[in-house]
Image (cartoon, rainbow, N blue to C red):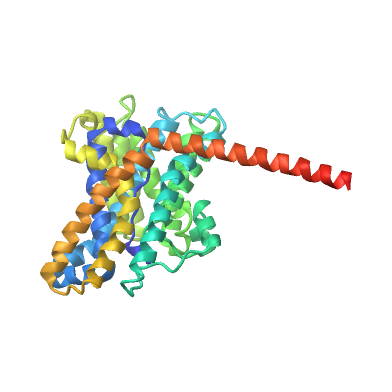
Amino acid sequence: MHRSNCGNIPVMSQAASRMPLIDALKAVAALLVLLNHFSSYGPLAEAAREAMPAIANWFFEYGRMAVQVFLVIAGFLAARGLSAHGQALAVSPLPLIWKRYLRLVIPYLAAIGLAIAAAAIADQWLDDEAIPARATFKQWLAHAVLLHGILGFDALSAGVWYIAIDFQLFALMAVLLWAGRRNVIAPALVLATALASLFWFNRDASWDNWAIYFFGSYGLGAAAWWASDRRQMSAWLGVIACIVIAALVVDFRLRIGLALAIALLLGFSRRNGILERWPNARPLAFLGQISYSIFLVHFPVLLLANGLYARFEFESPLSGMLGLILAVSASIVAATLFYRWIESPAASQRIAAALGTLSASLWQFAQRAGRLARRAMLGA
C-alpha cells in the first residue's frame, strides 16, 4: 500500500466534542480519507473511475490532503492540553506519553485484527495488490509497538503509518515542552522544531517515517492555539502566515498551504468564539466523534466489499457505484459499533483494565511456576 494515498485520523481529546468546528473539520476530513482509499484500491475503485472519472480522480489525487487537517487539529489540541498558556510541562512527560500510547493502540490493535481477518477472507475471492500478505508475528509486533514504518514492515491496513506518526508527534511535543522548563523557552522549542520541519525536513521524503517530517503542520496547530489566546496580539497569526509563506516560497507544497489555512481558521475561530458555537449540526458532530473509528475500520470493509464485488463478478459502472455507496455506508455503521464497543473512553478503560488483570494473572502464574521449578531442582 502506498503512503501517498493514505491519510489517517489522529485520536483527539474528548474535550474536542465541545468544539463543533473541530468536529465538523474532522468529519469532512474523515470522509475524504475514506473516499480517497475507496477510489484507490480494488475493482470498486476501477468501476468508480469508469463511471465518474473526474470525481474519482480528484478523490484519488487530493483526498489524501485531509491528513493535514488532522495534523493541525492534533497540534492545536495538544497545545491546549499540555501547555494551554504557553507554559513549560512541569511533570515528567513519560506518563502522558504512555497514556497516549494506550489511547491509540487499544482500538488500533483491534482494528488490525479485523484487517487481518478481512484480508484472509478477501484473498479467497480477489487477487489484488491492495490485499496485504499474510501477517507474521514479527510484523504484528512491529505494528503493536508502532515501529512498522521505521523497521520497514509492510502495512497491515491502509494508513496505519500515521498512527505511529501521531504518537511520535505527541511524544516529541511533550518532551520539548518538558525540556524547556521555562515558560518562554518551552513553546520556543516547539516553534523552532516546527520551523526546522517546514524549511528542511518536510522537503525530504526520506524523513517521512519520523515525526520531524510532519512537525511543521503539527506545530502550526500549536502556534494557532497560543497565538489565539485572548491576551495575545492577533498580529501573531499574521507572523505565522508570513513565516509559512516564506517556507512555501522556498519550496511550494500544497499540503503546507492547506495546513496554514486550517491553522488560521482555528486561530481566528477561537478568538471570535466561533470554535465553540458553529456549526451546530448533529451529523457532523457525530461523524467527528467517531472519525478515528471510521479510519480504523473502513479498510477491512473496503477489502470485504471489493472481495464480494469480485466474487459475484459484477462489472458494470452502475454496480460499482452502488457497491461503493453500500461500502461507504457499511463503513460508517461499522465505525459506530466499533466506537461504542472498542474506541469510546469507557470501552477502552474496560479493555485496558481487563488486559491489566490478565497481565497480572500471567505474571503471578509465571512466578509460581518459577518457584515450583526451583523447588523441583533443589529436591532433585
Q: Judge left or right: residue 302 versus residue 154.
A: left
In the rendered image, residue 210, in percent from the top left (x then y), is placed at 48, 55
The quadrant in which residue 80 appears is top left
Check the picture and name the quadrant holding the N terminus. Answer: bottom left
Image point 37% across, 48% down: which residue?
217
| Residue 348 rendering spot, x and y as whole percentages | 42, 37
| Farthest-out residue, top | 231
Q: Is residue 52 visible?
A: no
Which one is nearer the viewer's eye here, 333 or 129?
Answer: 333
Q: Looking at the image, which residue is at 28% across and 56% down?
A: 65
| Vertical side of 365 occupied by 42: above or below | below
Can see residue 167? Answer: yes
Please state if 54 lies on the left or on the right of 32 as rendered.
left
Q: How many marks?
A: 0
Q: Left or right of 152: which side holds 344?
A: left
**Is 280 situated left or right of 369 in this image?**
left
Front residue of this view, candidates 55 and 301: 301
x and y, in percent, of residue 27 in the image: 24, 45
The spot of residue 342 in percent (x, y) is 38, 42
Instruction: Indicate whether 84 appears above or below 70.
Output: above
